Amino acid sequence: MNSSTKKTMSPIPSKLMQLRKKRICRFCKDGARYIDYKDIKILSSYASERGRIPPRRITGNCAFHQRRLTQAIKRARTMGLLSFVAS
Ligand SMILES: [Zn+2]
């Protein structure tokens, strides 16, 4: 006799999917193709208090703009516009 383990498949309730907010990328909304590394106002709003770049699931950016944002923040850091670590 062998007792077969039942696979418990838990389908995601459709209600949960509906509740999920549709996040819109801020840069897509503005129609920005390029994120300026000199624009510290925008960059500092994305850099956390510890000076880290938050992941995409937190910022809500699209892959394209998240990449550009990361690049811009890193450029700003090397230019001395943003800090690497919290002061
Ligand atoms: Zn975008």
Image (cartoon, rainbow, N blue to C red):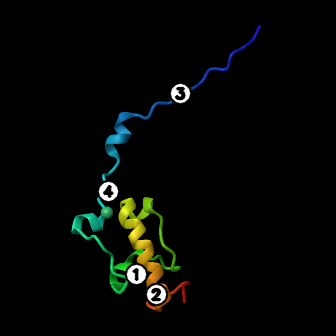
Please give the name of the residue rendered at 35% of the width and 48% of the height, measured from the top-left corner.
20
Q: Amino acid at mark 3?
A: Met
Q: Give the mark nearer the N terminus: 4 vs 3.
A: 3
Tell me where residue 37 sits by quadrant. Answer: bottom left
Q: Give the mark nearer the N terminus: 3 vs 1.
A: 3
Q: Amino acid at mark 1?
A: Ser
Is label 1 in a helix, a strand or a loop? helix
| Gap in angstroms between the C-alphas marked 3 and 2 | 47 Å
Question: Where residue 24 sits: x, y (%)?
Answer: 29, 59
| Gap in angstroms between the C-alphas marked 1 and 4 | 20 Å
Question: Where residue 23 sits: x, y (%)?
Answer: 32, 56
Is label 4 in a helix, a strand or a loop? loop
Q: Which one is in front, 43 or 6?
A: 43
What residue does disc 4 label?
Answer: 23
What residue does disc 2 label?
Answer: 82
What residue does disc 1 label?
Answer: 44
